[in-house]
Image: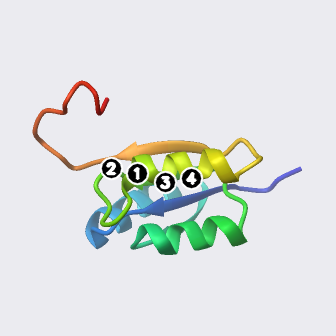
Amino acid sequence: MKDSFNVLVIDDNADLCETLALCLSKLGCDVSTAGTAETGMEKLQRFQYDAVFASLCLHNLGGMGIARWVRKNRINDTKIFITTSWKGEFERELL
């Protein structure tokens, strides 16, 4: 039986990344972080995660691109959550 829930937080905003990691840790998760999409995908290739929290607006790829990559390259049931600190409205097609 698995001891912990392994989570990866990918966000290029260090404050948001740290805050989300702290919140998830307090819930009992084993949290890793990545400051870029590329670093996050490297970690996803090396380690098994139960969930990924990826920023919608990451430089170069973004959370949606990471979600597509995870779905294409992962066999397990990694859950993907897209996060954002955007305060405006989203285009309907993006949602």
Q: Amino acid at mark 1?
A: Gly
Q: Earlier in the sequence, mark 2 or mark 3?
A: 2
Q: CA distance from mark 3 to mark 1?
A: 5 Å
The residue indicated by pointer 3 is: 66
Q: Is residue 3 visible?
A: yes
Which labelled disc corresponds to residue 56? 2
Q: Secondary structure at mark 2?
A: loop
Asked whether the beta carbons under mark 2 and mark 1 sit within 8 Å of each other, the answer is yes
Q: Amino acid at mark 4?
A: Trp
Q: CA distance from mark 4 to mark 3?
A: 5 Å
Q: CA distance from mark 4 to mark 1?
A: 10 Å
Q: Secondary structure at mark 4?
A: helix
Residue 32, by quadrant, is: bottom right
Looking at the rendered image, the quarter that the C terminus falls into is: top left
Asked whether the beta carbons under mark 4 and mark 3 sit within 8 Å of each other, the answer is yes
Q: Residue at x 53, y 46 (%)?
A: 68
Q: Secondary structure at mark 1?
A: helix
